[in-house]
Structures are given as structure tokens and as C-alpha cells.
């Protein structure tokens, strides 16, 4: 993550083979998934944004090197929400076996 605007724009052109002037946002994550840099063209020049998570990781759906996301999916990822993950809150499951009832609380 040492690259600045020029280095990241070069990666977009050479590795991703995309048009950097298209208005798309190009996001780069570090290996640990705790830091990202975003490069975008805004009609007059390039913008560079960075975000570092103090806790947790950015988790992307899939393993591909190139991924297209909806604006809402991108917002959720920036907020640290794992897409596709299902979490159950405060649900109690009752198991009845051989006349005995056992309760298991799931997180």
C-alpha cells in the first residue's frame, strides 16, 4: 500500500486494463484487509481516499482480483459488514430428546 495516485492509476491501466477516466471508483485493499485506498477521476483530477479499520477487516464477496459492486454493497463493506453472512440474534432453540428438554441459546 505504498503507492500513491500515480502508482494506483498505473495499476488500473496496466493490470486491470480499465479506463481510469470512466468515472468508476477503483479500490485497493492491503493483504490483511484492514486498509483500503480508493482512486477516482472527478472531471478535473484524480482523488485519493484512504480508510483504515481499527478493529475487524474489510471482507469482499468472492476471490476474484476484479469485482464490480453496487453502491449499497460498497457502503456495507466500508461499514465492516460481511456480505452474505447470516447472523441470528437472541434465538433460543429447544431440543427435546427422550423426554428431556435442553435449551441452547445461539448468538
Image (tube, rainbow, N blue to C red):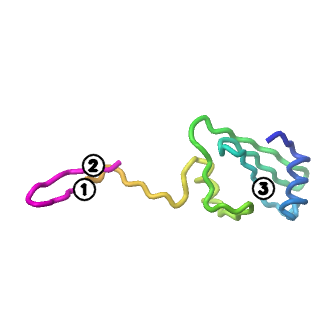
- Which mark, residue 93? 1
Most distant residue in the top direction:
54
Query: How many angstroms separate mark 2 from mark 3 (CA)?
Result: 42 Å
* Residue at (64% x, 56% y) in the render: 74
Where are the magenta residues, as a range? 93-107
For marks 2 and 3, the one nearer the N-term is 3
Circle 3 is placed at which residue position?
26
How many residues crowd around disc 3 within 10 Å: few (fewer than 14), some, or many (20 or more)? many
Which-is-in-front pick, marks 1 and 3? 1
* Residue at (25% x, 50% y) in the render: 104
Quadrant housing the N terminus = top right
Circle 2 is placed at which residue position?
105
Check whether the beta carbons of the residues at disc 1 and disc 2 lie within 8 A of each other. Answer: yes
For marks 1 and 2, the one nearer the N-term is 1
Q: Nearer the viewer, residue 34 or 22?
A: 34
For marks 1 and 3, the one nearer the N-term is 3
Residue 99 counted in the magenta span? yes
Most distant residue in the left direction:
99
Picture coordinates of residue 65, whole percent (x, y)? 74, 60
The picture quadrant where one finds residue 61 is: bottom right
Q: Secondary structure at mark 2?
A: strand
Q: Nearer the viewer, residue 1 or 68?
A: 1
Most distant residue in the front direction:
98
How many residues crowd around disc 2 within 10 Å: few (fewer than 14), some, or many (20 or more)? few
Q: Residue 6 vs residue 103: left or right?
A: right
Picture coordinates of residue 46, whole percent (x, y)? 87, 49
Q: Secondary structure at mark 3?
A: strand
* Residue at (81% x, 50% y) in the render: 39
Check whether the beta carbons of the residues at disc 1 and disc 3 lie within 8 A of each other. Answer: no
- Which mark, residue 63? none
Amino acid at each position: 500500500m505504498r503507492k500513491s495516485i500515480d502508482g494506483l492509476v498505473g495499476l488500473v491501466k496496466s493490470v486491470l486494463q480499465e479506463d481510469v477516466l470512466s468515472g468508476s471508483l477503483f479500490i485497493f485493499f492491503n493483504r490483511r484487509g484492514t486498509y483500503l485506498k480508493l482512486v477516482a477521476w472527478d472531471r478535473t483530477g484524480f482523488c485519493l481516499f484512504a480508510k483504515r479499520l481499527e478493529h475487524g477487516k474489510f471482507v469482499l464477496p468472492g476471490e476474484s482480483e476484479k469485482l464490480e459492486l453496487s453502491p449499497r454493497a460498497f457502503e456495507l463493506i466500508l461499514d465492516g459488514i460481511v456480505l452474505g453472512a447470516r447472523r441470528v440474534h437472541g434465538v433460543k432453540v429447544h431440543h427435546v430428546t427422550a423426554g428431556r428438554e435442553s435449551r441452547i441459546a445461539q448468538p
